[in-house]
Image: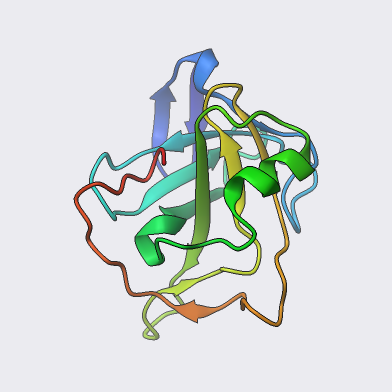
Amino acid sequence: MRVSGTRFGEIELDDAKIINFAGGLIGFPDAKRFVLLDSNQAGRVGWLQSLDLPALAFPVVDGTAIDASYPQPPAEQLAREAGFGLDQLAVLVIVAAPKGKGLYANLLAPLVVDLTSHAGAQVVLDPRKYAAAVPLILTMRPETTASAR
């Protein structure tokens, strides 16, 4: 499949890599199909590119690069509650970079993805524990990848 996006131009991707967010994402209910453009480097930023809205791409990082115990409840419980498998889970955190203000992570509403079935869901965690704009400091652990955990 070939996709033309505004950020990365034309990209070719394997249909089997499409991640389906049945409920869309917060603020983007019609954006249901995405592909993860991975940096393949531990603790680095990847991109979640929408296939439904080509202008939409989110920078994301592996949640465990932020904190090894993130999220609580654990990814397995969140995936079960979202109604999909537990084979190979990734927890992705959307990153924002307001001009001149550094990087911020949305720890309140991570994306949980089953990398085997390619099902995903954005979940909202306890706002007493997590915030939507947390200054981002990555721990560059060699075993951490942006694509799987």
Tell me the residue at 57%/46% (across/down).
55
Compared to residue 147, the image places residue 19 above or below, namely above
Compared to residue 56, the image places residue 2 above or below, namely above
In this picture, residue 65 sits left or right of residue 40: right
Tell me the residue at 36%/80% (across/down).
102
Relative image position of residue 67 (x, y in whole percent): 41, 66
Relative image position of residue 128 (x, y in whole percent): 70, 82
Relative image position of residue 96 (x, y in whole percent): 48, 69
Q: Relative to the observer, which residue lies in front, 5 or 69?
A: 69
Judged from this view, the residue extending furthest toward the bottom is 101
In this picture, residue 71 sits left or right of residue 61: right
Quadrant position of the C terminus in the picture: top left
Tell me the residue at 37%/45% (across/down).
146
Answer with the quarter of the image where residue 99 lies: bottom left
Answer with the quarter of the image where residue 84 lies: top right
Q: Relative to the observer, which residue lies in front, 146 or 18?
A: 146
In this picture, residue 43 sits left or right of residue 49: left
Q: Relative to the observer, which residue lies in front, 12 or 145?
A: 145
Q: Relative to the observer, which residue lies in front, 24 or 69?
A: 69
Tell me the residue at 56%/68% (across/down).
106
